[in-house]
Image: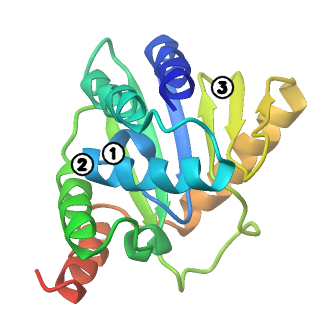
Amino acid sequence: MGPTQEAFLDLVKETRESKHYCPDVVWGSLQTPAYVRAMLTLVVDFLETPRDIEAGVRARTARAELFGKDGRTYTTLLGEQALRCNIGGSEVMREQLARVLESFALPGVTLGIVPSRARLHVFPGNSFGIFDGKRVEVELFGESPTLTEEGQVRLYEKAFGLLERSAVYGEDAKALVRAELAALGR
């Protein structure tokens, strides 16, 4: 996990404008160390790769240090399911949801939530990130493709724009996060 997360950190450092869609889990740059640890443990166990989880935790959480720096912007959409998907247990999720609530105020971050009952304008797909409008990273169980062909990047930009139409922002989005925190007993 260390080399993989370090390579991704390098990409994030080079990027000025990024867009992310995460329907089922919290976007990596907003993850708490405990959530990252639980997530990477699931990945390592599934893929049967070396267990260098702590190196992965350090690299993934280092991305948050870039918020508000050098004019970077992050437009992120989380599916409501991402707030409910139990990664690491109730305590990890309480901490993670509190972090999501704090994230609405991060410099350069626009955070929207796509409610599970929202009318969609495009069919649901996998998590993906768009980097400076030139590169798309798609997250899959196996090999996760990097797309740089202009037509493919435009297709993901179009999908992102349609997903944005289904999202809620500001107080409406915070209310969804607070409801999930309340469901966990906080």
Q: Residue at x 40, y 66 (%)?
A: 87
Which image quadrant is residue 38 in? bottom left
Instruction: Give the mark toward the camera: 1 or 2.
Output: 1
Q: Residue at x 35, y 62 (%)?
A: 169
Mark 1 vs mark 3, CA separation in Å: 21 Å
Foreground pick, 163 / 23: 23
Instruction: Give the mark toward the camera: 1 or 3.
Output: 1
Residue ID for mark 1: 30
Q: Specify which label sits upstream in the sequence, 1 or 3.
A: 1
State which quarter of the image contains the C terminus: bottom left
Left or right position of 176 against 19: left
Q: Quick one: SS at disc 3?
A: loop
Across and down, in percent, residue 74 comes to 42, 35
Residue ID for mark 2: 103
Dot 2: within a 10 Å radius of its alpha carbon, few (fewer than 14), some, or many (20 or more) residues?
some
| Residue type, label 1 | Leu
| Residue type, label 3 | Gly
Foreground pick, 132 / 52: 52
Dot 1: within a 10 Å radius of its alpha carbon, few (fewer than 14), some, or many (20 or more) residues?
many
| Residue type, label 2 | Ser
Residue ID for mark 3: 133
